[in-house]
């Protein structure tokens, strides 16, 4: 009887371990969501480009890999004053400047937290969510240094 209890406990622990490790991507996305929504009532960062003050917030950045002496870092960013129809040449200037200032090589850019959460929610978005994402997902931008 004691052996059966031990087997059940070990099996349960293994299942929990596999479940928790499998959830790591979801948990990191959930944490991203929490961090993202915390800034909405706070001051966000600004840069000055072409006579305009550009508001932005880097939600997170993550080192993807290192090649030689160069680190490749991906960032998630909110640009509340831009959307999917914004001027791409201005966006390139914005991302180049933010990337150089913050050592980021690639951006996943969104207009708002809702779009970021829809993009990373892990399930097919509803029709209204798809429409919001179409307008609010600005794009993925790679910085060439």
Image (spheres, helix red, strand yellow):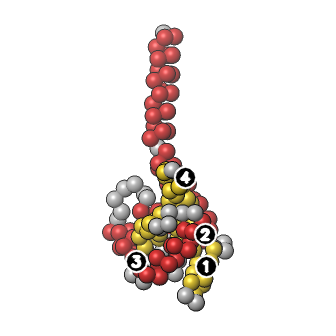
Which element is circle 4 on? loop
Name the residue at 55% across, 52% down. 69
Query: Distance from label 4 to label 3 (Cα)?
Result: 34 Å
Looking at the image, which residue sits at the far front?
A: 68
Which labelled disc corresponds to residue 74? none
Query: Distance from label 2 to label 1 (Cα)?
Result: 10 Å
The vertical placement of 95 against 9, above or below, is: below
- In this figure, which residue is indicated by the disc labeled 2? 101
Which labelled disc corresponds to residue 47? 1
Which labelled disc corresponds to residue 84? 3
Query: Distance from label 4 to label 2 (Cα)?
Result: 18 Å
Badge nearest the viewer, 2 or 1: 2
Note whether residue 32 is visible.
no
Name the residue at 47% across, 28% down. 14
Badge nearest the viewer, 4 or 2: 4
Where is residue 142? Give x, y as percent: 44, 66
In which quarter of the view is residue 132 placed? bottom left
Query: Distance from label 3 to label 1 (Cα)?
Result: 20 Å
**Which numbered disc, 4 or 2, marks the residue that appears first in the sequence?**
4
Which labelled disc corresponds to residue 69? 4
**Which numbered disc, 4 or 1, marks the residue that appears first in the sequence?**
1
Where is residue 26? Give x, y as percent: 47, 50
Which element is circle 3 on? loop
Query: Distance from label 4 to label 1 (Cα)?
Result: 28 Å
Name the residue at 62% across, 77% down. 46
**Which numbered disc, 2 or 1, marks the residue that appears first in the sequence?**
1
Question: Looking at the image, do the residues carrying marks 4 and 3 touch, with CB atoms under 8 Å apart?
Answer: no
Which element is circle 2 on? helix
């Amino acid at each position: 009887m004691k052996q059966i209890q031990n087997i059940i406990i070990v099996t349960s622990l293994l299942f929990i371990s596999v479940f928790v490790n499998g959830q790591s991507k979801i948990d990191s996305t959930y944490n991203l969501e929490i961090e993202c929504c915390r800034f909405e009532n706070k001051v966000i960062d600004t840069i000055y480009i072409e006579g305009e003050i550009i508001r932005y917030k880097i939600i997170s950045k993550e080192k993807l890999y290192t090649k030689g002496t160069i680190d490749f870092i991906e960032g998630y960013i909110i640009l509340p004053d831009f959307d999917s129809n914004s001027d791409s040449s201005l966006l390139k200037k914005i991302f180049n400047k933010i990337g150089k200032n913050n050592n980021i090589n690639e951006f996943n850019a969104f207009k708002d937290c809702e779009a970021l959460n829809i993009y990373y929610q892990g399930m097919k978005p509803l029709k209204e969510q798809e429409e919001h994402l179409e307008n609010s997902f600005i794009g993925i931008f790679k910085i060439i240094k």
